Image (tube, rainbow, N blue to C red):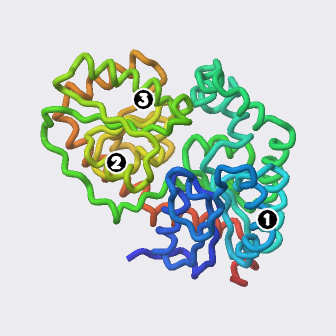
């Protein structure tokens, strides 16, 4: 039986990415809380939400969203015990409009938190600092600009622009605390917040709803699955993973097959993933994100971030099932060749991966971490009044 560390709370999760807040809602609801999700549905993923904040592709979409917020939607975001925003830019609007909405949320709700699950100015500063906590990431690799930084200097300029940077700093100054989704975001948030205001939550996965795949003892042909967002290939390094996988497929045509999909709706994407043995996730990370954890919950193998620093951070000494990907093209080829030529290892690695997600990322476990941090950051007077 799932138990909550506190009495029933009214919670608003505002903004989303890769179904994070919607999965967190599942865990919080099972613990007995009343949860509303307001988001754009992670855009192409079209994930579930109660309040739709999506902008559509027309010239008036921003004005229409702003009108809806001012006349109705912000009123629907009032009166909550806890509001947690997904990013300082939690609305797909200009910084000054996010600032207006942020101040409204601060005034009209009991507490305000950040779910650190994406890029912001603090992350950019830390990621591009040669002496920063992340030697490699999507923006820099061992002190040098990454392919993504070279391809998209406009994004770096935007996050560093005074208006946006000041808004991010302001957000960190007024929130009651933050809970991080990833090891990387935790490190960068620690440059902005004292230890008492920051906790690691992890990524919530609804393991109860996922029936694991039973991999064969030794598949005749290893199926490598690569799901790509067409606008984020360079950012996630899937362009380099794809090139490495194609080299391996060409060298071992009878031993592996590459299955590639782009921008499928969330439910279709998950169904397609289940037909694979190995999910090729991303390159520039120290830890697994949603795609990799979903694959592991299915009992599949995954190539993703699995550095020792991540395992040590979460206190995991025994189970280390992630096939670690590092930003080195020849190393990627060697790693994938080992996977393809040792198919007898896939089944057991998949079983361990499922156990890993159940232990560290089930949505109830993650929800309890969030609740513990939220309530620890509230004053005793506030808690008594809830």
Q: Is residue 52 visible?
A: yes
Quarter of the image with the N terminus in it:
bottom left
- Of tags 3 and 1, the one toward the viewer is 1
Residue 8 placement (x, y as % from top left): 58, 81
**Residue 194 in sight:** no
Count of marks overlaid on the render: 3
Of labels 3 and 2, earlier in sequence is: 2
Circles 3 and 1, Cβ within 8 Å, touching? The answer is no
The residue lying toward the viewer, choosing from 175 and 226, is: 226
- In the picture of the structure, the residue carrying the numbered disc 2 is 296
Give neighbour class at mark 3: few <14, some 14-19, many 20+ (Cα, 10 Å).
Answer: many
Residue drawn 30% across the image and 41% down it: 301
* Residue 145 higher or lower than 65, as above or below: above
Side of 373 where 60 appears, left or right: right
Mark 1 or mark 3, which is nearer the start of the sequence? 1
The quarter holding residue 41 reads bottom right
Q: CA distance from mark 3 to mark 2?
A: 15 Å
Which is more toward the observer, 119 or 235?
235
Question: For the point 45% across and 37% down, which residue is it?
Answer: 228
Identify the residue position indicated by label 1 in the image. 67
Image quarter for residue 255?
top left
- At mark 2, the secondary structure is helix
Q: Looking at this rendering, what residue extends furthest in the bottom direction?
A: 385
Image position of 36 (left or right of 108): left
Q: Who's the residue at 71% across and 70% down the image?
A: 378
Q: What's the CA distance linking mark 3 and mark 1?
A: 45 Å
Q: Secondary structure at mark 3?
A: loop
Residue 245, percent across and down?
Answer: 34, 25
Q: Which label belongs to residue 325?
A: 3
């Amino acid at each position: 039986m799932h138990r909550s560390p506190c009495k029933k709370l009214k919670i608003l999760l505002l903004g989303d990415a890769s179904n994070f807040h919607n999965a967190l809602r599942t865990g919080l609801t099972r613990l007995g809380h009343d949860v509303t999700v307001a988001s754009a549905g992670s855009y192409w993923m079209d994930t579930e939400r109660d309040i739709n904040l999506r902008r559509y592709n027309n010239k008036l979409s921003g004005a229409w969203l702003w009108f809806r917020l001012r006349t109705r939607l912000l009123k629907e975001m009032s009166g909550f015990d806890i509001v947690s925003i997904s990013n300082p830019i939690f609305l797909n609007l200009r910084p000054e409009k996010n600032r207006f909405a942020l101040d409204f949320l601060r005034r009209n709700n009991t507490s305000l938190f950040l779910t650190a699950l994406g890029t912001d100015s603090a992350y950019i500063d830390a990621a591009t600092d040669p002496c920063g906590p992340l030697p490699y990431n999507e923006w820099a690799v061992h002190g040098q600009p990454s392919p993504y930084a070279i391809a998209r200097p406009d994004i770096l300029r935007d996050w560093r622009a005074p208006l946006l940077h000041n808004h991010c700093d302001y957000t960190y100054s007024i929130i009651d605390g933050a809970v991080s989704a990833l090891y990387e975001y935790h490190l960068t948030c620690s440059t902005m917040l004292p230890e008492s205001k920051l906790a690691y939550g992890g990524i919530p996965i609804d393991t109860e709803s996922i029936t694991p795949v039973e991999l064969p003892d030794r598949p005749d042909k290893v199926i490598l699955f690569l799901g790509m967002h067409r606008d984020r290939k360079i950012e996630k390094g899937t362009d380099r993973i794809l090139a490495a996988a194609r080299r391996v497929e060409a060298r071992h045509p009878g031993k592996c097959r590459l299955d590639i999909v782009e921008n499928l709706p969330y439910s279709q994407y998950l169904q397609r993933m289940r037909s694979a043995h190995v999910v090729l996730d991303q390159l520039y990370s120290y830890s697994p994100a949603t795609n990799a954890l979903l694959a592991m919950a299915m009992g599949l193998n995954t190539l993703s971030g699995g550095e020792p620093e991540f395992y040590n951070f979460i206190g995991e000494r025994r189970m280390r099932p992630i096939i670690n990907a590092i930003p080195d093209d020849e190393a990627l080829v060697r790693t994938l060749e080992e996977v393809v030529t040792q198919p007898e290892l896939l089944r057991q690695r998949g079983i361990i991966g499922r156990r890993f997600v159940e232990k560290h990322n089930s949505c109830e476990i993650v929800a309890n971490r969030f609740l513990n941090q939220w309530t620890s950051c509230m004053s005793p007077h506030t808690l008594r009044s809830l």
